[in-house]
Image (cartoon, rainbow, N blue to C red):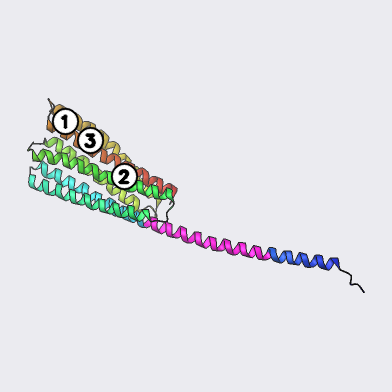
Amino acid sequence: MERSIDHNVVLDNNITSYNRVRFINKIRIILNNRILGDVLATWFWLAKSREKRIIHDSIRHLTKIREVAEDLNNMINNIYVNDKLKAIDFYNKLDKDEKDADEIKRNIIKELSTSTLHPMDREDLLKLIFTSDDIAAFLKACSHKLKILLDIQIEIDKEIINRISEVELMIIKQIELLIDSLENLYRDISTTLTYTNLVEEIEEKIDMLKMELQETIYSKCETITIRCLLLKEAIEDIEMASDKCEDVADIIRMIATTYS
């Protein structure tokens, strides 16, 4: 006697089997997504942690650059009082501090080369480091022009050197504001933006002082001399250092508004 096939039972079994497979696949997807989510969360945490560490190192870098600026100001002050030996001592200290800043820069670049950061984040941090380094480079260039004048025993007009010192103090203030802005980057973005805006305002004042200084130099230089040329270049170097401070402020603003 032939057994009849209950098609309804077969259909029910097939549906049950199909639903079981779908259920298992859903579980697999959920587990895979959860694992992927955990992996991504870990990656983001590591990337953010490394970014904060690099920002901390950038603060150390700028702190050393502030020392370079202070060295230049001390050199200028000793030129003003005609103490050539002390002025040269501060020039040598500036040279050492600038090299120390370079070493910090190289270590940060090495850290970035092996980091898990997104390429765009890495690029912004590299811009921060290289542009900060430009500040120190222009300050050193200014000190070198002044040292040449000392070496060849050319007297520098006290009014001019006093005005250069005035500008240099403003650059020190700019660098301090940049440090403060980075220190507040992960605590209070509005404070960071306020500090960077102040850096820009100081740069505008320095632009005006530069023009006044150039007028003073031209009024005292009836003929083109080594003193006039070197002082003009020294003022341009110090003004470029201020411009680079503003550029660093722009980069910090970009980091603050985009990634923080």
Does the segment drawn in magenta span residue 192? no
The residue that disc 1 covers is: 217
Q: Which mark is residue 229?
A: none
Circle nearer the N terminus (2, 3): 2
Circle nearer the N terminus (3, 1): 1
- 108 vs 156, nearest the viewer: 108
Mark 1 surroundings within 10 Å by alpha-carbon count, few (fewer than 14), some (14 through 19), many (20 or more): some
* Residue 193 visible in image: no
Mark 2 surroundings within 10 Å by alpha-carbon count, few (fewer than 14), some (14 through 19), many (20 or more): many
- 238 vs 22, nearest the viewer: 22
Please report the bounds of the magenta region as a residue range.
23-52
Q: Residue at x 36, y 57 (%)?
A: 53
Circle nearer the N terminus (1, 2): 2
Left or right position of 51 against 32: left
Q: Residue at x 29, y 52 (%)?
A: 106
Q: How many marks?
A: 3
Residue 16 falls in which quadrant of the image?
Answer: bottom right
Q: In the displayed structure, would residue 176 be above or below residue 234?
A: below
Residue 187 falls in which quadrant of the image?
Answer: bottom left
Residue type (three-letter) at the residue carrying disc 2:
Thr
The residue that disc 2 covers is: 131
Q: Secondary structure at mark 3?
A: helix
Q: In the displayed structure, would residue 139 be above or below residue 209?
A: below
* Residue 205 visible in image: yes
Does the segment drawn in magenta span residue 39? yes
Residue type (three-letter) at the residue carrying disc 3:
Glu
Q: Which mark is residue 236?
A: 3
Q: CA distance from mark 3 to mark 1?
A: 12 Å
Q: Secondary structure at mark 2?
A: helix
Question: Quick one: which residue is furthest to the bottom in this view?
Answer: 1
